Amino acid sequence: SIKKWINTLKETLSPKTVREIVTRLASIHDLWRQEHKISYNPFETIVIKQLDNLEPDPFTKTEISLILGTEAIPSIQYLLPCVFWTGLSISEQIAIAWEDIDLEKGTIHVKRNYVKGVFKVTKNRRRKREIKLLQPAIQALRKQYALTGNRYSKTIDVLQRDNRTYKKERLHFVWINPEHDSPYNYHELLYVWTKHLKKVKVRYRGINHGRHTFASQLLSSGQVPPEWIADQLGHSDTSMIYKHYGKLIASDS
């Protein structure tokens, strides 16, 4: 009966979500079994297979030069360096507001993300972090400030970590889609990103590969400790760096 219920969940939910639900239920059941001294565990034989994570496929130095060296539409011209040189995920990048940025100190406070039409606080406390900006990102953000720094603010509802409570925030967003006069969402950004890659004749990879590229380029430089990279990306240790972001590009080393 539990397996039937799990199969029903699989019809509408991703394997990752099903796994999280079943794990929580198994933990509750484990406490109940301990209390009632019951040895039988129906969850013992249940395995939820997750899809393999896609192998990171970072851009090379040559590709980065082509992407950044070719004129893009004005609304993403200064976003492109930030895609490669901040280490932010795209859901974090599009939720960034000028209130989060200190250009004098060269920092961004990562406090929220934007996923499927909802602003949320970072998915865990480790992802709420202050990142240090590299020089190309600082230069790009200074130029972007002239475009969106003094625009009117927007009040949004930010979903808190309990997944029930919303908190209002009044913010001046950094990356604005001029067609709708509102912050870019993921699909709009993906569309203009894809067009730009076609224009510069660079092999297509999703825009989140900019984050992989950030880690890969810094690792292959040999100048940056992996601990610093992990901190920038919001990881608790370097294991994720070596597992997911440590693809060194031989021609760039």
Image: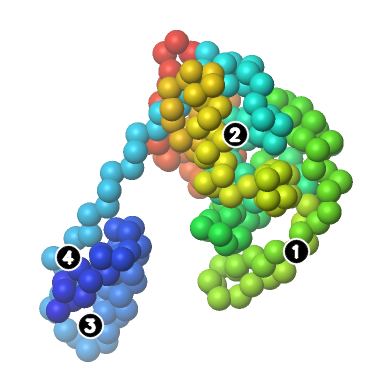
SS at circle 1: strand
Say if mark 4 contacts mark 1, CB within 8 Å: no
Foreground of the two, 216 or 142: 142
Residue 33 marker: 3
Q: Residue at x 42, y 39 (%)?
A: 239
Q: Nearer the viewer, mark 2 or mark 4?
A: 2
Q: Nearer the viewer, residue 20 or 14?
A: 14
Q: Nearer the viewer, mark 1 or mark 2?
A: 1
- Asked if marks 3 and 1 touch (Cβ < 8 Å), the reply is no
Of callouts 2 and 3, which one flags the residue occurring earlier in the amino acid sequence?
3
Q: Which residue is mark 4?
A: 46
Cα–Cα gap, marks 4 and 3 = 17 Å
Give the quarter of the figure containing the N terminus.
Answer: bottom left
Dot 3 amino acid type: Arg
- First in residue order: circle 4 vs circle 3: 3
Which residue lies at the image location 48% right of the left edge and 18% below the top edge? 201
Relative to the observer, which residue lies in front, 52 or 64? 64
The residue beneath circle 2 is 83
Q: Name the kind of residue labelled 4 in the image.
A: Ile
Image position of 108 with respect to 34: above or below = above
**Which disc is residue 155 wearing?**
1
- Image location of residue 250, percent across then percent down: 42, 13
Where, by quadrant of the figure, is residue 205 drawn? top left
The numbered mark at residue 1 is none
* Label 4: element kind: loop
Q: What residue lies at 61% left-to-right and 75% top-to-bottom?
A: 165
**Place of residue 150 in the rendered image (x, y in percent of width and height, measured from the top left):** 86, 46
Query: Against 202, is 194 above or below?
Result: below
Discs 4/1, front: 1
Mark 3 or 1, nearer chain start: 3
* Dot 1 and dot 2 residues touching (CB under 8 Å): no
